[in-house]
Amino acid sequence: MKGFLLVISGPTAAGKGTIVKEILKKRDDIVTSISVTTRYQRENEVDGVDYFFKTQEEFDELIETNKLLEHAVVHGNLYGTPLAFVEKSINEGKVVILEIDVQGASQVRENYDNGVFVFMLPPKKSDIETRLRHRNTESEDMIQTRLRNAEVELAQIRYYDYYLINDYIDSATERLEEIIDEELEKRRK
Ligand code: 5GP
């Protein structure tokens, strides 16, 4: 049986990355795609683990040679999903998680008919700003950009199959696992 794509979007600092890391620890039938980006590398990030960090020229080359499944400008930087890894993993029967923004998700929705779309959000709207500031990785300008974009992202929630409230890491991870199992079960029938 082939695997499927599980797209997770949601406003900045919704905790998508944390939940994805947790689920990867628990399951070997789930993998996550590592995106390419032109964003600056944060101090705690490792090239090839968190992202493949690229120059604008390198990124353009990937677009021109059709190496990306989708790509978008998010908060002023380019982000994209490498196609080869996704294809290989799906053929191996894996569930492939894409943690991507709403524009990328819409491209996946158009080009791929077997995706599952999950929108993750914190319990309270004000948590977005609190978490973003607490993370201490962005300049004030970038915090403002990300907060504005959060509104744009939230307006797209209706296109998603599942909503996932990230209240506690354990329960949100369990809920995501349930969603994946439900979808695997549907595909087995
Ligand atoms: P961050 O800079 O905080 O790591 O990510 C910013 C946003 O970019 C997040 O909302 C994340 O989902 C999105 N993003 C990360 N990788 C990709 C990608 O490959 N494609 C798209 N379209 N968005 C991405």
Image (cartoon, rainbow, N blue to C red):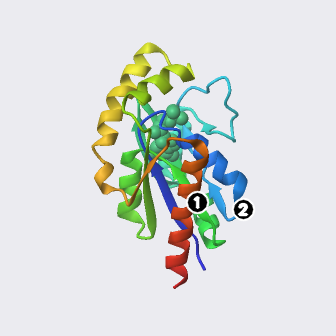
Marking on residue 83: none
Residue 37 appears at what percent x and percent y? 54, 37
Q: Is residue 33 above or below residue 142?
A: below
Local secondary structure at mark 2: loop
Give the left or right position of residue 44, taking residue 106 as reference.
right
**Label located before the other in sequence (2 or 1):** 2
Residue 51 appears at what percent x and percent y? 62, 39
Residue for badge 1 = 177
Q: Residue furthest bottom?
A: 189
Residue for badge 2 = 28
Residue 76, picture quadrant: top left
Q: Is residue 60 visible?
A: no
Residue 67, picture quadrant: bottom right
Residue at 49 percent of width and 43 percent of height = 166
Tell me the amino acid under the disc marked 1: Glu
Residue at 71 percent of width and 56 percent of height = 26
